Image (cartoon, rainbow, N blue to C red):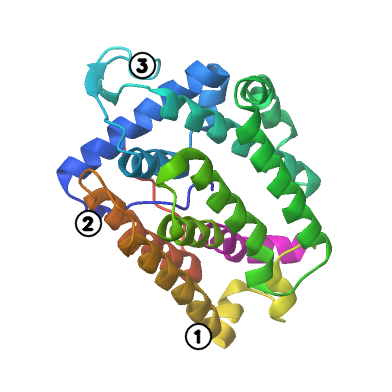
Amino acid sequence: MFGYVRYDLPNLYIKDLMLYRAMYCGLCKGIAQSCGQAARLGLTYDVAFLSVLLHNITETDIRIEKQNCFEHRLKRRPIAETDDLTRELGALNTVMVYYKLTDDILDKSRGRSRRVWFKKGYKRARKQYPELVKIVENYMIEQAKTEKRNSDSPDMAADPSAQMMQTLSRHFLKEKANAATDKLFYALGKWVYLIDALDDFEKDRKKKNYNPFVLSYDCKTRAELMERYGEDIAFLFDTTFYDMREGLSGVKFYYNRDLTDNVILRGLPAETARVMKGEAPNKLNAEV
């Protein structure tokens, strides 16, 4: 989860944009409290959305107050106060970034120097949240095994990441986890893996890194891939969106769900269309 889980700004209510900004900044402070200041450099949109989603499903009240932060020292801004859930999500953010950079290093990409910034935070996360880190580690191992088998099935390739997201949801939701949340979070994890693989199609093909789309389709560029097999790939994502909607319909939300619906029902499909077209990502208007 690294920058793909985004809201659809043209259809986002102002109140929900303000909520997202407050939660984003609150997660940043949560990262600092659980993993240290340096780990804040890895703050992601994706875990910020998880914070919104999990706070709602777990009925965890969000208190927003005007505060200062290290990036906005002069002007106080609305920030969600940190709680136990925020701090643990901050640890998850740090662990995921650490493993992402480790994966980049293994893929002979940049990441070695950046990973140094997160090493201490990763160690703090392991000490404070051993169960959480164990979940991530176990599924990262399974993901590596799956990719080592060179499976050309996008569904099989995405399964460990999807299972990880589902298991993490159970970890955070506890007694509020059910079949609907399982389906929603599994589909969300699957989508993240698939959209990342599709976005990296040309890079992975050039570097000969594992990518199920490269193995499945004999194409040299993403443009050629979409021209020849766009309908197949669109169907793959459409089935994932169907599962998200099915799960979403059965989830009990305790607070306003407009922001969640905007991201899942509008933001993710828009991001999928962007990647399919090969367009550059737009910076979210979150004042970050």
Q: Residue at x 60, y 73 (%)?
A: 222
Q: Residue at x 67, y 30 (%)?
A: 114
Disc ID at residue 69: 3
Q: Is residue 167 visible?
A: yes
Amino acid type, mark 3? Cys
Q: Earlier in the sequence, mark 2 or mark 1?
A: 2
Query: Where's residue 242, x and y in %?
Result: 41, 73
Query: Where's residue 39, x and y in %?
Result: 56, 24
Q: Is residue 288 visible?
A: no
Bounds of the magenta span?
Answer: 191-207
The residue that disc 2 covers is: 10
Q: Does the magenta stretch mainly form a helix, a strand or a loop?
A: helix
Badge 1: how crowded within 10 Å, few (<14), some, or many (20+)?
A: few
**Residue nearest the observer in this picture, 247 or 29:** 247
Amino acid type, mark 2? Pro
The residue that disc 1 covers is: 231
Amino acid type, mark 1? Glu
Query: Looking at the rendering, which quadrant does residue 245 occupy?
Result: bottom left
Q: Earlier in the sequence, mark 3 or mark 2?
A: 2
Q: Is residue 194 above or below residue 259?
A: below
